[in-house]
Amino acid sequence: MHLAINAYFWNRPNSGSGQYTRYLVTTLRQMVSDLQITLIYPQFNDPGLQDVPPGVDVCPVPTRLGHVGKVWFEQRGFPGACTAVHADIAHIPYWGGPLRSAIPHVVTVHDLTTMLVPEYRRKASARLYNALVSASARGASHIITDSHASKEEIMAHLHIPPEKITPIHLAVTADYQPQPNSLLDMAVLRKYDLPDFYVLYLGGYELHKNVTTLLLAWTYVGQALGDEYPLILAGKKPETISATYPDYDSYIQKLGIGDYVRWIGYVDEANKPSLYRNAETFVFPSRREGFGLPVLEALACGTPVVTTNATSLPEVLGEAGFAVDPDDVRGMAGAIIATIVQDDLAKELRGTAVTQAAKFSWADTAVQTLHVYDQVLRRLGA
């Protein structure tokens, strides 16, 4: 089998689609020796793809920068290159498949957030792109998605029959594990000037991440625990305020919790396991996720987790932490406080977290994805 992969996000390893593409390709290459893989990518004024696994081919497609260039690559450049390299099947690992393709193609639709959250589709360009990728998803040979919750939404809103959609969970690498690396952990804690005790949020700050509810919950947590257990906000802080990025600084000031909240900004991927491991609790208050990878990362590090019962998050969490309603401010605060003041509970959660995380692996993800490819080719007689 010759598999062509849309590698648009390959050189963005910190993005969700970039990580998914890299880990999937690397694992497939390690597991299946006779699988030929070609990464097809839009070539701008750059040296090409970085960190390509041995034995994986690359095919550049000269492309202009910007939104128009992205759409051209997805709709013309990528399918044309698939034909040129004589691929048997193509995989687009994000919601950006072609309307037409000469070969069977699988599209991974991680979630429908940009389609279902009104604030994300106010611009005409966003509505047009949503219409384009929705039509392309309906024409795909098969859809992969990250969770059963996302499958239900795809069925309901894109009107794709269930037999054409396969939910395949994601995973984390072996770097995320509970055993401390004393020297590394110490260096990371010093790098970000972290205290001995802290509660961690690590993720994006878009509207659906629901960080404002976490901050409101902190009016209760801060009163109960004081500044000895600050809330650490990790991840790139929004540079502008808009309908999709709230004014967090003003909200923190309005709530009077400035003494209990600290921003540390962007965190290098290599530093994330240390931050999770040393946190008392990880909080992920999101309203919408296709999967919820930060929750799994924290679980794998043996960290107690407080998240919500929205969309896919219960599938990831299992019984290994607290899942509260995303609007339940008091419930969120109470769960956070409980994980800190109840030592027996915290100890139990640390054990169940690792057990739950062990249920997910990139090997399983790769095997299930390979089964989808085989299923598509058999069905089409390719």
Image (tube, rainbow, N blue to C red):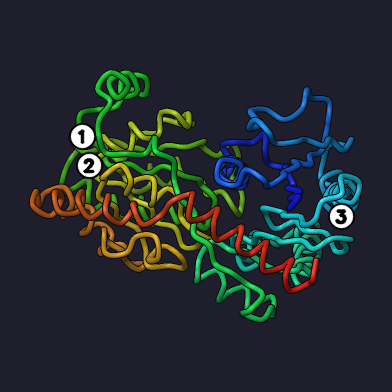
Name the residue beneath numbered marker 2: 280
Identify which residue, 318 or 124, lies in the foreground: 318
Picture residue at 15% right of the left edge, 50% below the top? 346
Q: Is residue 326 visible?
A: no
Identify which residue, 142 or 132, lies in the foreground: 142
Query: Crowding near pointer 3: few (<14 within 10 Å), some, many (20+)?
Result: many
Contact (CB < 8 A) between labels 3 and 1? no
Name the residue beneath numbered marker 1: 197
Percent across and percent down for residue 226 are 17, 40
Does label 3 or label 1 sit earlier along the sequence? 3
Picture residue at 77% right of the left edge, 58% below the top? 97
- In the figure, 192 relative to 294: above or below? above
Q: Quadrant of residue 119?
A: bottom right
> Which residue is situated farthest in the front direction here?
34
Compared across the picture, whether 74 is left or right of 332 comes to right
- Quadrant of the image containing the C terminus: bottom right
Compared across the picture, whether 83 is left or right of 360 comes to right
Percent across and percent down for residue 143 are 67, 67
Residue type, label 1: Phe
Compared across the picture, whether 258 is left or right of 47 comes to left
- In the figure, 192 relative to 239: above or below? above
Name the residue beneath numbered marker 3: 75
Does label 2 or label 3 sit earlier along the sequence? 3
Percent across and percent down for residue 236 are 51, 36
Q: Is residue 373 visible?
A: yes
- In the figure, 156 relative to 69: above or below? below
Residue type, label 2: Glu
